[in-house]
Image (tube, rainbow, N blue to C red):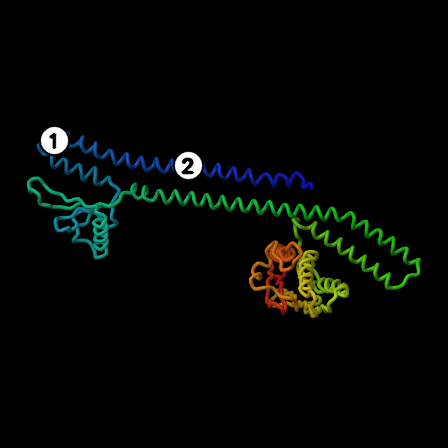
């Protein structure tokens, strides 16, 4: 079977795209981790530099008489103002004296703060104390007595380091999910292309013998005019001609799979009537008594559809209804009407019905309540209605032993 160069490219390109995705995606994730880690290392390096600078200043001030005031001034001007994490200095009763990076005014005294700002300070103090981030400050001349407390929070670097495993896990998870989705999408795309190729090839292979059969039937018809045969035999030849023409239409439909669909204004009443008439003429071949009724309220109404595909969809439902009436007498009723601008086509049978457990899966490929067949008819019908015509198809009602009602709803003409 030859699918052509363009389809071969489509089959090979998913593997190439997946390789590119995993290689490039892995590279981006690794690069992100390297840059993120380096930024953290840079922050920790700057923080670590504080201690050597403090020692250097201490030794430079130690030779001067006022070294204590100089050291205190250095700590407040150079160290505390340079930190980016929250810090609160309190007295021995834990009343705030000085604070920084807590989200309130830093130049005000505690007594000048409003109630909201004091609440913020208290919440910060409570959180820092709960985490154990507290340092008691003692002075040599005061012995062991604690005169102040220093409360501190987490630095930005520590927060980023804490969240780093979660960020990494999230990135890897998103990467894997998109990878799995891409694999699923490409595999499904390959399967669709395979079905499209098979359908087009089948349509091509059927086209030649069907055209030949039509030609021989025309020859046979021309010779029958010169022979004295009964009307029943002529009618049988006419039926054969109609069936072969129907085969040609079916082959044409398969040839349209994968092609661009063009919706055109169509007299849907006549189209449905011709499908109903085609099956009515063949009902006598069934052993059981089946009547097909067509009730239409869309005479002279044009609906934008693809005539071949919509006819295919409806005929699939009619054929399913006939199959469901196996060894049963009863009616198949096709109803067409419009409501709120939308066109409804209902196909009802009095057959064996669909078990409840299968109703939700009846449109899935390969699912069938019949012993024979591939279970593709309803799947193709759903695709024709929902993907090509942007409509809906669903099971309105199904009772085992009583019958099933399918309904197609086509959107308003636009």
Give me the disc on residue 16: none
* Nearer to me, 195 or 361: 361
Helix, strand or loop at label 1? It is loop
Compared to 290, does 71 lie above or below?
above
Earlier-in-chain disc, 1 versus 2: 2
Name the side, left or right, on which 89 lies relative to 254. Answer: left
Image location (x, y in percent) of residue 184: 54, 46
Question: Which residue has dot 1 on it?
Answer: 62
Q: What distance separates the C-alpha of mark 1 from that of mark 2?
A: 49 Å
Question: Which residue has dot 2 on it?
Answer: 30
- The image shows a total of numbered marks equal to 2
Name the side, left or right, on which 168 lies relative to 84. Answer: right
Which residue shows up at 51% across the image and 37% down it? 20
* Nearer to me, 305 or 278: 278
Front position among marks 1 and 2: 2
State which quadrant residue 411 falls in: bottom right
* Nearer to me, 198 or 330: 330
Compared to 70, does 317 lie above or below?
below
Q: Is residue 265 visible?
A: no
């Amino acid at each position: 079977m030859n699918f052509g160069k363009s389809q071969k490219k489509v089959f090979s390109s998913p593997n190439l795209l997946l390789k590119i995705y995993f290689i490039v995606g892995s590279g981006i994730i690794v690069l992100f981790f390297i840059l993120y880690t380096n930024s953290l290392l840079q922050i920790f390096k700057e923080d670590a530099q504080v201690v050597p600078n403090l020692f250097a200043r201490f030794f430079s001030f130690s030779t001067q008489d006022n070294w204590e005031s100089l050291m205190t001034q250095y700590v407040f001007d150079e160290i505390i103002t340079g930190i980016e994490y929250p810090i609160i200095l309190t007295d021995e009763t834990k009343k705030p004296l000085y604070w920084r990076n807590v989200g309130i005014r830093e130049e005000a005294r505690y007594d000048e703060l409003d109630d909201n700002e004091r609440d913020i300070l208290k919440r910060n103090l409570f959180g820092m104390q709960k985490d154990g981030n507290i340092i008691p400050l003692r002075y040599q001349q005061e012995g062991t007595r604690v005169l102040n407390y220093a409360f501190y929070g987490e630095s930005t670097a520590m927060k980023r380091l804490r969240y780093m495993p979660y960020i990494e896990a999230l990135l890897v998870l998103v990467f894997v999910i998109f990878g799995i989705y891409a694999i699923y999408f490409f595999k499904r795309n390959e399967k669709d292309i395979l079905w499209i190729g098979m359908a087009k090839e089948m349509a091509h292979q059927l086209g030649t013998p069907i055209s030949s059969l039509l030609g021989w039937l025309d020859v046979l018809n021309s010779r029958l005019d010169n022979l004295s045969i009964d009307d029943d035999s002529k009618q049988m030849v006419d039926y054969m001609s109609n069936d072969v023409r129907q085969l040609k239409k079916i082959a044409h439909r398969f040839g349209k799979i994968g092609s661009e669909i063009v919706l055109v204004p169509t007299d849907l009443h006549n189209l449905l009537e011709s499908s109903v008439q085609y099956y009515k003429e063949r009902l006598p071949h069934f052993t059981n008594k089946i009547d097909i009724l067509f009730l239409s309220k869309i005479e002279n109404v044009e609906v934008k559809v693809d005539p071949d595909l919509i006819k295919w969809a409806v005929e699939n439902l009619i054929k399913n209804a006939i199959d469901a009436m196996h060894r049963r007498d009863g009616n198949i009723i096709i109803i067409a009407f419009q409501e709120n601008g939308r066109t409804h086509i209902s196909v009802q049978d009095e057959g064996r019905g669909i078990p409840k457990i299968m109703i939700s899966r009846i449109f899935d490929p390969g699912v069938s309540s019949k012993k024979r067949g591939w279970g593709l008819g309803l799947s193709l019908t759903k695709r024709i209605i929902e993907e090509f015509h942007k409509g809906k198809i669903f099971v309105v009602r199904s009772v085992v032993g009583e019958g099933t009602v399918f309904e197609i709803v086509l959107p308003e003409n636009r």
